[in-house]
Amino acid sequence: MNWYPTALPPQAGRRYLVTGANAGLGFFTAARLAGAGAHVLLAGRSPERLEAAMAAIRTARPEASVEPLVVDVASLASVRVAARRLAHRPPLDGVVANAGMVHTPGERLTSPDGNELVLATNVLGHFALLADLVPHLADGARIVSLGSLSSRLSTFRVDDLQLERGYDFWRAYAQSKIATQVFAFELDRRLRAAGLPISSLVAHPGYSISGRTPRVPGVNEPTAGARFADALQAAWAQGKHRGAEITLHALTAPEAQGGQFWGPRYAVKGPPTLQTPTRTSTDAAIAARFWTFAEGATGTTFALGA
């Protein structure tokens, strides 16, 4: 596809799930995988937006093999329905846990299950989904979670993950992204300990914005004003199609390995490069506390057996 400057390894015969695939980073990740020959399940809340995303992919590549999976990751009931559907399908070669809230609410809101909404959307839904999906992943499968530079810019209240003692929209986002990274690195440790041939990695897309992204009808259609404003940030911003390349590298590159943290070479933009995550993100004691919390908040037992 002409949205992408670099080639992916051939993906024919492989199957991937990308959450939040109807727009943004998720769309360009799914489009690139489909363009390389994979069968891609595009997951999102809106059937109409998923159809628009699949139509855009098929317009560029009529032979693309894509299908929708309607799921709201903020709702545990929706996640469990989706997981049951996938359990009866051929195994997946990879999962991109991309869905999430970037523009967070100004006040504390809760999910249908009573969890803080940003945490529920960005982390807990994927925790519950992967707890059910891991047994149905193919040998050699990779799970890529979307991290963020914000993990370097905030503390982590592991004793107040629901932000009941104090909420602001920035902390809600940053803390959810730290939690995402904590979960992803701990998942890789537990997969290794269980002897399972599956890996978990983190990719952060730098500063990727819509106005620097190609126009895709029905998927990415920023106004002229938004494009002008985003063009003023060109020195330190990139399009979401470029940010997706970090995710794609972590998912498909032969040199990528479990437990790694990939990001843009120049922090906010640039080609994929291996980076060092924060100490909080890789702290095993913090991870154990988060894992226990997440199991309780989702009513899920995330057990990994050989």
Image: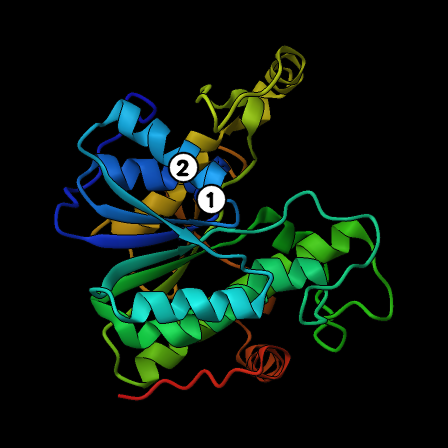
Question: Which corner quadrant holds the C terminus?
Answer: bottom left
Looking at the image, residue 238 lies above or below residue 272: above
Q: Nearer the viewer, residue 207 or 28?
A: 28
Q: Which residue is mark 2?
A: 51
- Front position in the image: 301 or 235: 301
Residue 222 percent across, percent down from the top left: 58, 20
Residue 288: quadrant of the picture: bottom right
Q: Which residue appears at 60% of the width and 65% of the height?
A: 179
| 78 relative to 38, above or below | below
- The residue lying toward the viewer, choosing from 26 and 60, is 60
Task: Please state which of residues 295 and 185 is positioned toward the viewer in this rendering.
Answer: 295
Q: Which mark, residue 129?
A: none
Can residue 6 be seen by looking at this rendering? Answer: yes
Q: In the visual, does 100 lie left or right of 60?
A: right
Instruction: Find disc 1 in the rendering and name its residue.
Output: 47
* Circles 2 and 1 in contact, beta carbons < 8 Å: yes
Residue drawn where x is 36% and y is 27% of the image: 56
Mark 2 is surrounded, within 10 Å at the Cα level, by few (under 14), some (14 to 19) or many (20 or more) other residues, namely: some
- Quarter occupied by residue 281: bottom right
Q: Is residue 145 left or right of residue 195?
A: right
Q: In the displayed structure, would residue 143 be above or below residue 216?
A: below
Q: Amino acid at mark 2?
A: Glu
Residue 77: x %, y % from top left: 54, 70
| Quadrant in the picture for residue 34 | top left
Name, please, the residue furthest toward the front.
Answer: 48
Image quarter (top left, top right, bottom left or bottom right) of the N terminus: top left
Residue farthest to the right, as pictured = 165
Q: Position of residue 99 (x, y in %)?
A: 51, 51
